[in-house]
Image (tube, rainbow, N blue to C red):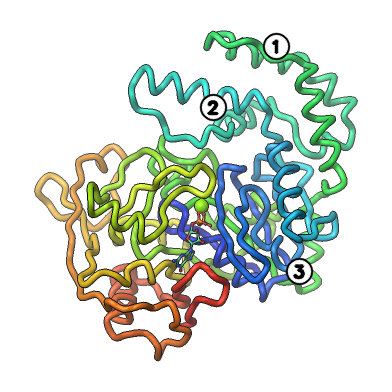
Amino acid sequence: MLTSICGINWGDEGKGRMVDLLSRDFDIVCRYQGGNNAGHTVINDRGRFVLNLLPSGILREGVVNVMGPGMVIDLKHLCNEIERLREGGIEISPANLKISDKAVITMPYNVLQDIMEEDRLTKATGKPYGSTRRGIAPVYADKYMKKVFRMGELLNTELMYKRLPDIVVWKNMTIKAYGFDPVTVEEMIEYFETYGKKLAPYVVDTGLYLNSAEEAGKNIMFEAQLGALRDIDYGIVPYTSSSSTIAAYAPIGAGVPNLKLNNSIGIMKAYSSCVGEGPFTCEYFGEEAERLRKLGGEYGAATGRPRRVGPFDAVASRYGIRCQGADEIALTKLDVLDDYEEIEICTHYELDGKVIDDFPFTDVLDKCKPVFEKVKGWHCSLAECRRKEDLPKEALDYIRLLEKLCSCKIKYVSVGAERDAYIKL
Ligand code: GDP
Ligand code: MG
């Protein structure tokens, strides 16, 4: 069984929380794209964990975790993340963590580039991209320029160190143009020696590993970072991530382009949140935003930034479901709406006086206005609901309305951050 778990919205839908729950039925969990710009918060019987690079299956004993070729890996960040989890009692060894030899290494100069460019954009235009400043866009750009180092090279650094000086010369041309001090070959070697060497024992051909696991009948889950609207091709460019967050990319990004997914589970939030910049049509402002932000605890896991919030957006969610080819939905954070007597939903957009159903091209989004509808809230706590029968009528009506608006079955409803706070419909 090959299943992908992906985000329907702008990210932070609770993918980590759902992977932590659903991984009980899987042998392997793979991350297939992105880097340490992810922030998945997971709360279970072992504690509260924030994961940036490691697959969320790392918290479950017996699950093997794979970091695929589609990922970009900051060596220092990964070493620190492993240390932090070990301190929290999580065992990590080459038996339960396998890193693709083809995954790309995020370099310290990529982080510097990200910061330089966001600062330049802010000064020049007042409109930064809202990057997490962790080097993700520059390292993916280098990948397509074919000027990167890959994890497999850590097993034979001699060749790598021969290529390094010219890449440093090339990179310093950019760094100097921003008016910053050039980086040195020695600093980069120190980075590889200090952190890369620690990670070398985890490096394998994840394609071979996953293919033989699949042949042996193992269940494999692919875990996405961010949501459909942050996808490099289908998202709100340029306010997107720099990788493909789409389920169809999962086999490629994990190392098994020859395998086909059996199903795609979309993680969709009961309201909307968006961290960083970009068009966000259904956005709330002022007190309305503050109320929902507080109720939902919407502050970035990776950055601590307050997230922008709004009601459920049916236009964007329908598009997200289409992009992800979602067969079924896990609806998260429904309990956050407990307090509302009436709940707003953005059912359509208005563009130049016309009501539209389909998510438009990014440039046009800025001109779109949300069309809201109000439905009756349940106005009581869902925290203890564990069965469909426990849900108040209004909550069930809300779920059914979202299903109707999105033409997709909602199979799971999450009513709390803890592992068992969910309902299977
Ligand atoms: P991800 O990036 O998609 O994994 O999501 P994040 O971890 O960034 O954000 C989701 C946040 O909501 C985390 O702090 C979770 O602990 C929390 N969370 C997840 N599901 C629920 C839920 O059903 N109810 C509530 N109240 N919190 C939830
Ligand atoms: Mg997140």
Q: Which mark is residue 392?
A: none
Which residue carries the number 3 mark? 61
Q: State whether label 3 is within 8 Å of ligand 1.
A: no
Q: Is residue 317 left or right of residue 97?
A: left
How far apart are the alpha carbons under marks 2 and 3? Answer: 36 Å
Q: Residues within 10 Å of mark 2 (few under 14, many from 20)?
A: many
- Mark 2 and 3 residues: CB-CB less than 8 Å, in contact? no
Question: Measured along the vertical axis of the image, is residue 154 above or below residue 125?
Answer: below
Residue at 87 percent of width and 29 percent of height: 157
Callout 1: SS: helix
**What's the distance in space between the residues labelled 2 and 1, CA to CA?**
18 Å
Of residues 341 and 1, the one nearer the viewer is 341
Tag 3–tag 1 contact (CB < 8 Å): no
Q: Is residue 366 left or right of residue 124?
A: left
The residue at the point 69 percent across, 25 percent down is: 147
Disc 1 crowd, CA 10 A, few/some/many (<14, 14-19, 20+):
some
Please tell me which of labels 2 and 1 falls first in the chain.
2
Eye-nearest disc, 3 or 1: 3
Q: Position of residue 148 (x, y in %)?
A: 70, 29
Q: What residue is drawn where x is 76% and y is 69%?
A: 61
Residue labelled with disc 2: 114
- On screen, residue 234 versus residue 143, left or right, reads left
Instruction: In the displayed orientation, state which residue is furthest to the left.
Output: 353
The residue carrying mark 1 is 169
Nearer the observer, 58 or 90: 90
Name which residue type carries label 2.
Asp
Q: Check disc 1 and give the amino acid type.
A: Val
- Answer above or below: position of 127 versus 213: above
The percent coordinates of residue 302 (x first, y second) are 54, 45
